[in-house]
Amino acid sequence: MGYREKTSEKYGQYTDYENYTMLTENELAVLKMQNSGMSISEIADQLGLTVGTIRVYLSNSVRKIDGTLTIDEIQRRCRDSVKKRYYKLKDQGINPASIKKNKRVFDGLSARDRADQRAEKVITEIANGKTVKEVADEYGCSRQNIHSIIDGYRKRATGSAKNRDGKIEMFKTYGKITVLCANPDSGKKYKMYNCRCETCGRIFLQRGQDILKYQDMGCPECRKKQRKKQREEEARSHIGEVYGQLEIIGFVGMREMHGKMTPVMKCLCHKCQKKTEIPLVKLRAGQAKECANCARMNLRKGQEITRRATVGGTMVTAIDGKRQKNKNNTSGHNGVSRYAQTGKWRAYINFKQKQYHLGLYDCVEDAIAAREAAEKKLYGDFLEWYAESYPEEWAKLQARKTKLH
């Protein structure tokens, strides 16, 4: 008789599954699969667990059914495990609040049992004549918390409280996700399940609430591919739109930009009829209105205009016509500001990389008049000389000035 036949004969007598209420979901599932003729390695591959874990589940199942592994023994193991972890944390100098949280389960009670004991004590004190405010002061909480404790106890007693663990059933398929078993290494805050994606067949770990949330999408890898496909479809919907001189004519693909995957579009520049690739986010934000070739040409034109308009350290475009005032201008006129030491108005003018002081005035109108007189004296003669000496450049500047206005 082989090993598989001996194992089947050993566990085959345990088939009264309806009466095995002392077993956990995983233990009952493993026992059923073992009796169906599957080997331990096949069960491990099916559930996404290790062979050692499957052996422990089978051993605990038999011992619980035979009565050799009692509830007291399980609680004792739990207490010993928590004590060991508690002293290990204490030796490592972990936060005392975390240590205190681990000490709470030394009595072997679940969180629900502790909540019920506290609620029964609160209800007893109120029935003996204490007010809700007195009980709240005794426990160091608000009256609303006392009412929440009582309401929660009543819901649990009547069965109206939500049972989150009951939402997920073993070996049930939710959309594209099939639940295999509860993960034995899941934390205390969230219960984790080993699941299989029906789309790609991948086994993955998922929280119970996320199984219901993403049941139509599948495993994380399938969800990632689906989100990428949705982004590509959304990017293709912008084909044909025009941003400045650029028209989107196609979708190139997804590229990494600042640590994120960004759709890149193929664009046609109406100015030079060249094709270029630009991220969609730059087009929609208004950062790109023409291709890089046109931008370089415009930069060269601006540099050439600046070079031609600069003579002797003075830029003609800066003194020809009204310049825009700075945001921090207090007088409303260029070259006029308040002198902080005396509070008077100071007039000045810049010409050929030098600044000329035009005096201090009690009235702002006098300072503005001095500035305008200096502009006529310095700028007027200089502009006349520039127009006579450089007639072609002067004509281009005037044409550009007219075009801008």
Image (cartoon, helix red, strand yellow):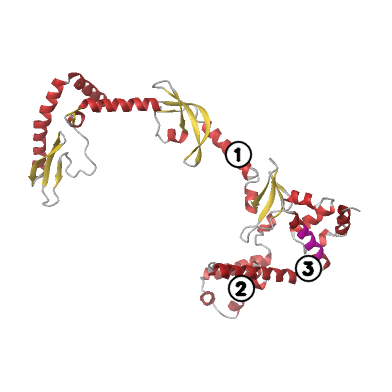
**Quadrant location of the C terminus in the rendered image:** top left
- The residue type indicated by label 1 comes to Lys
The answer to which image quadrant residue 155 occupies is bottom right
What secondary structure is the magenta-colored segment mainly?
helix
Q: Are marks 2 and 3 in contact (CB under 8 Å)?
A: no
The front one of 388 and 238 is: 388
Q: Nearer the viewer, mark 2 or mark 1?
A: 1
Give how far across and how far down residue 332 sits, in percent.
18, 41
Single out the residue that lies furthest toward the right.
Answer: 1
- The residue type indicated by label 2 comes to Arg
- Report the Cα–Cα distance between label 2 and label 3: 30 Å
Residue at 22% of width from left, 40% of height from top? 326
The front one of 222 and 216 is: 222
Residue under label 3, please give it.
69
- Report the Cα–Cα distance between label 3 and label 1: 47 Å
Which sits earlier in the primary sequence, circle 3 or circle 1? 3
Write the start and end of the magenta stretch as one range.
55-63
Residue under label 2, please give it.
118
Which sits earlier in the primary sequence, circle 2 or circle 1? 2
- Report the Cα–Cα distance between label 2 and label 1: 48 Å
Q: Bin the neighbour count of mark 2 within 10 Å (Cα to Cα): few under 14, some 14-19, many 20 and up.
A: some
The front one of 93 and 35 is: 93
Give the numbered dot on residue 225: 1
Q: Nearer the viewer, mark 3 or mark 1?
A: 3
Q: Is residue 91 above or below residue 253?
A: below
